[in-house]
Image (tube, rainbow, N blue to C red):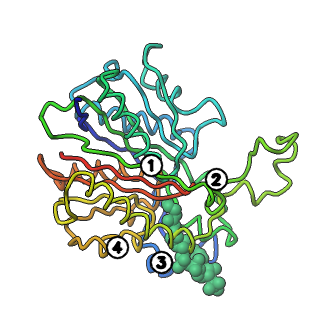
């Protein structure tokens, strides 16, 4: 069976930079607390009227297509991962299709797996390319968190972490034997669904629109940070080791690990557990915060731009987040 490879990667972030000092004006927090607990120095917040989840995704997608030497018309399938869609329905995939000016022959699939959404989407796209159903698949992760955060002291454990941004890759059949996506590994554990959640709007409540404001707190993300952290530091190494074992490889074979940018402390813990030196782990959470489904393609795009990924390198992507869901992908670049 043929393999797929990442032929292009791109990203877009809103222009507005929000520093930790800016958050100090909104809630009881400090730059020192945020940096010490998360490593984050600043993040981007969208501008209403300029940025949408779909158009940010489209901007990242255009760059990815350009790098691949392709045009939007070449795209045969869109896979769009986000937890912050433009609408409750339809999903942002069709809006991206419209943004790119594509015809009705390009279907759009929406993925709802939060921080693992990009790798879940990549896995789906990989299967379509492997089976020969499609040759060119766009995988997009895009998020606008800032419009839905509780920016009072009440929501500070979540609000300081999340940021806005987008990233995209183009998958094509691999032209070199043994190169491309080697394998993807997906997991879920629904018993922890409420550990990181936005409860409203919920279809489970009759007259939901009328009742949505009854408990305003449920409109905001709720996170049991310590428990998420505890599970993350176990699941990340597990799913990376699973990918290595399947391919008869070892941690020392990894040239670059790109962990989902959840918290710099989590990334550092995973790095230590995997025994990887600093130069083999890519982090940009310092500048963007946690952008959930966008975080891995955003980091991959910057890593490629900075020359951190070379032809033949073994690149490992790994994610953990709400659901809980977690996932990894191993790529021979
Ligand atoms: O994308 C994947 C999903 N998300 C994650 O992976 C996040 C995982 N969890 C985390 O990153 C960490 O749990 C946090 C960064 C969210 C919190 O760090 P922590 O070290 O676990 O802090 P904590 O929740 O144990 O809170 C410690 C203290 C509390 O005060 P008291 O009860 O000790 O007086 C909090 O109220 O820090 C307080 N606190 C803050 N203080 C200043 C919580 N948020 C803030 C804040 N600024 N922003």
As measured in the structure, the alpha-carbon distance from the residue carrying label 4 to the one carrying label 1 is 23 Å
Image quadrant containing the N terminus: top left
- Residue placed under numbered mark 2 in the picture: 148
- Residue placed under numbered mark 4 in the picture: 268
Ligand 1 - quadrant of the structure image: bottom right
As measured in the structure, the alpha-carbon distance from the residue carrying label 2 to the one carrying label 3 is 22 Å
Which of marks 2 and 4 precedes in the sequence?
A: 2
As measured in the structure, the alpha-carbon distance from the residue carrying label 3 to the one carrying label 1 is 22 Å
Asked if the residue at tag 4 contacts the one at tag 3, i.e. Cβ–Cβ closer than 8 Å, the answer is: no
Which of marks 2 and 1 precedes in the sequence?
A: 2
> From the Cβ of disc 2, is ligand 1 less than 8 Å away?
no
Asked if the residue at tag 3 contacts the one at tag 2, i.e. Cβ–Cβ closer than 8 Å, the answer is: no
Asked if the residue at tag 1 contacts the one at tag 4, i.e. Cβ–Cβ closer than 8 Å, the answer is: no
Q: Residue at x 53, y 28 (%)?
A: 95
As measured in the structure, the alpha-carbon distance from the residue carrying label 1 to the one carrying label 2 is 14 Å
Q: Residue at x 36, y 40 (%)?
A: 168
Which of labels 2 and 3 is toward the front? 3
Q: Is residue 21 visible?
A: no
| Left or right position of 57 against 190 | left
Q: Secondary structure at mark 3?
A: helix
Q: Residue at x 18, y 56 (%)?
A: 308
| Left or right position of 310 against 145 | left
- Residue placed under numbered mark 1 in the picture: 165
User: Mark number for residue 285?
Assistant: none
- Residue placed under numbered mark 3 in the picture: 37
**180, 207: nearer the viewer:** 180
The location of residue 301, given as percent across then percent down, is 29, 48
The location of residue 26, given as percent across then percent down, is 63, 69
> From the Cβ of disc 3, is ligand 1 less than 8 Å away?
yes
Asked if the residue at tag 2 contacts the one at tag 1, i.e. Cβ–Cβ closer than 8 Å, the answer is: no
**98, 260: nearer the viewer:** 260
Q: Residues within 10 Å of mark 2 (few under 14, many from 20)?
A: few
């Amino acid at each position: 069976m043929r393999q797929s490879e990442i032929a292009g990667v791109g990203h877009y972030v809103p222009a507005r930079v929000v520093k930790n000092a800016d958050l100090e004006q909104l809630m009881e927090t400090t730059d020192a607390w945020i940096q010490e607990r998360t490593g984050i120095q600043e993040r981007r917040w969208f501008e209403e009227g300029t940025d949408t989840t779909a158009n940010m995704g489209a901007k990242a997608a255009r760059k990815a297509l350009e790098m691949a030497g392709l045009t939007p018309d070449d795209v045969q399938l869109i896979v769009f991962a986000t937890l912050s869609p433009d609408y409750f329905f339809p999903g942002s995939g069709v809006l991206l299709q419209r943004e790119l000016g594509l015809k009705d022959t390009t279907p759009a699939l929406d993925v709802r797996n939060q921080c693992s959404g990009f790798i879940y989407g990549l896995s789906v796209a990989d299967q379509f390319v492997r089976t020969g159903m499609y040759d060119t698949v766009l995988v997009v992760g895009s998020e606008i968190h800032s419009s839905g955060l509780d920016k009072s002291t009440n929501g500070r454990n979540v609000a300081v972490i999340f940021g806005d941004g987008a990233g995209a890759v183009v998958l094509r059949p691999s032209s070199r034997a043994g190169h491309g996506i080697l394998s993807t590994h997906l997991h879920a554990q629904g018993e922890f669904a409420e550990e990181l959640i936005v409860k409203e709007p919920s279809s489970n409540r009759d007259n939901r629109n009328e009742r949505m404001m009854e408990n305003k707190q449920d409109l905001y993300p709720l996170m049991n940070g310590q428990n998420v952290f505890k599970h993350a530091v176990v699941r990340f190494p597990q799913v990376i080791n699973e990918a290595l074992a399947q391919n008869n490889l070892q941690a020392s074979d990894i040239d670059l690990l790109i962990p989902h940018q959840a918290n710099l402390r989590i990334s550092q813990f995973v790095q230590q557990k995997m025994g990887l030196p600093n130069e083999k782990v890519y982090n940009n959470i310092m500048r963007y915060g946690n952008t959930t489904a966008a975080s891995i393609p955003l980091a991959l795009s910057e890593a490629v731009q900075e020359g951190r990924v070379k032809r033949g390198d073994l690149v490992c992507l790994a994610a953990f987040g709400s659901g809980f869901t977690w996932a990894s992908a191993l790529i021979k670049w």
